Amino acid sequence: MDIQVVNGGSISLEDGVFQKDFNEGLVHQAVVSSMAGSRSGTKAQKNRAAVSGGGIKPWRQKGTGRARAGTIRSPLWRSGGVTFASAPRDFSKKMNKKMHIAAMRSIFSELVRQDALVVVDKVEMSEPKTKSMIALLNEVAGTTNALVITAADDANVILSSRNIPHCDATTVAGINPVNLISHDKVVVTEDAIAKIQEWLA
């Protein structure tokens, strides 16, 4: 199939990448896997074994009139260990490579069907300027709620877009299911489209 390029011309898209049926279940798995993998899972607290000190019984077992105590690091004590302490954990959910690629094809196909995929010849910024990026997005996509995908890293494009609400810029290597479906429009350069087709073909 062919798709129109903004400011003239058209390019051919591979049906095997941009003409797939929308598989909601598979896309949901890909989104959950992507979001789970981005969680740091570094929260940690000390249980009574990890808290320092407490190697000696605070007072003798009987005869003091106080409740018996074996260590000052008991969870009942101030500065003692936490009863059910949080530990670092891995939240990632495994997803097979073939399933991930199939989900990405499904998303890109749906973007084409909904006219949410906008192809431009290039996205260039001579300097980091938010106003210029807003003007460009309004011209080619009609909205600033957009994901801009370039073939290679461009510091000016990234810096120009990061202060715009609901706007992100990334390379083909940084594409994930979450950022694709969380914007009204996806603006892709011709070079990036070629890399996407090479990746998902």
Image: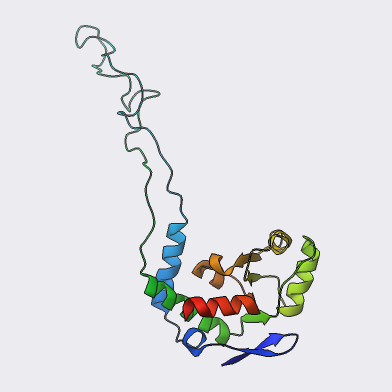
Left or right of 59? Residue 131 is right
Left or right of 25? Residue 12 is right
Q: How many marks?
A: 0
Report the quarter where the N terminus lies.
bottom right
Q: Nearer the viewer, residue 65 or 39?
A: 39
Residue at x 47% of width, y 81% of height? 201
Q: Position of residue 35 (x, y in %)?
A: 46, 61
Left or right of 106? Residue 85 is left
Q: Nearer the viewer, residue 97 or 139?
A: 97
Residue at x 32% of width, y 34% of height? 83
Q: Position of residue 92 (x, y in %)?
A: 39, 57
Q: Relative to residue 16, is residue 189 depicted above or below?
A: above
Q: Residue furthest top?
A: 63
Q: Residue furthest bottom?
A: 1
Q: Relative to residue 6, is residue 73 depicted above or below?
A: above
Left or right of 96? Residue 151 is right
Quadrant of the image occupied by residue 119: bottom right
Q: Position of residue 156 (x, y in %)?
A: 73, 61
Which color mode does the image show? rainbow
Quadrant of the image occupied by residue 168: bottom right
Q: Position of residue 93 (x, y in %)?
A: 37, 61
Quadrant of the image occupied by residue 64: top left
Q: Relative to residue 35, is residue 67 depicted above or below?
A: above
